[in-house]
Amino acid sequence: MEISTSLLSVKEEQSVHTFYRLETAHTDYFHIDVMDGKFVDDDTTEKMKIYSDNLKNITNIPLDVHLMVKDVKKYVDIFSPNEPKCITFHLEATKNKEEVFEIINYIKQYSKVGISIKPDTEVEKVYEFLPFVHSVLVMTVNPGKGGQNLIPETIDKIKKLREYIDSNDLDTEIEADGGINIENIKELKKAGVNIAVVGSSLINSKDYKYTINKLKED
Ligand code: DX5
Ligand code: ZN
């Protein structure tokens, strides 16, 4: 299981120190939660842009950008200069299938592409896009803020998606995002998750190295 640390709950005044601690603790990715104030209520663009710019100067650990935005291309243009490893957009931010493919191809100019679905979006809605994306980001909380509890029904969605990917010989990765901690990550692993996004349960822990090792434990 790889860990992508969400920076949403990192305090700005301690951010550089926190980034170094996370690098030393071997997080696999830094998860950049971009919110535009339209797709979700908060606007984190400025804070996430500063964090992405700083991270590019501090570390080689890849950036995993999660766009919770309506105008996807606008935000791809803002964050692509930080050379992220993956840029993920929301299916719910698109009008139709043509637009989904247009955005997939737009992002592919810069990085791997992920598609994300909210808890109440059926998993079948992404099936037709799976051969064209690197990963599916299954939201295990409603997007918009950190520190929420994982919604248990989303685990069945992950199981269904894993079953579909495997039975169709696809190599699409499954990433889960929201409310993940040492207690529930084992169930997510069993359900077929490859990458877990972890925010507050890691950022608020005392010892990052210990917490990340526990999260990665088989
Ligand atoms: C929610 C974000 C998630 C979340 C992760 O909109 O996409 O990345 O903040 O943070 P925790 O682990 O605190 O739920
Ligand atoms: Zn996220």
Image: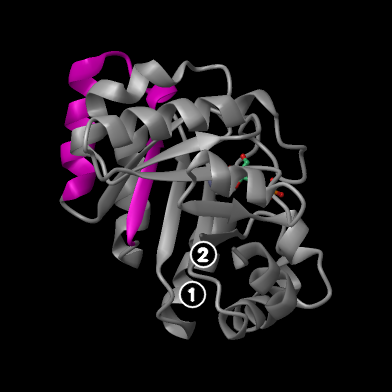
Dominant secondary structure of the magenta stretch? Answer: helix
Circle 2 sits on which residue? Answer: 30
Residue beneath the point at 38% across and 25% down: 91
Residue 55's disc is 1
Contact check, label 2 and label 1, Cβ < 8 Å: yes
- Residue 149 position within the rendered picture, expressed as x and y whole percent measured from the top left: 77, 37
* Image quarter of residue 15: bottom right
Closer to the camera, 80 or 204? 204
Q: Is residue 218 above or below residue 162?
A: below
Q: Secondary structure at mark 1?
A: helix
- Residue 33 position within the rendered picture, expressed as x and y whole percent measured from the top left: 55, 49
User: Mark 2 or 1 closer to N-term?
Assistant: 2
* Image quarter of residue 101: top left
Q: Which residues are magenta?
A: 85-108
Tell me the amino acid under the disc marked 1: Leu
Closer to the camera, 167 or 119? 167
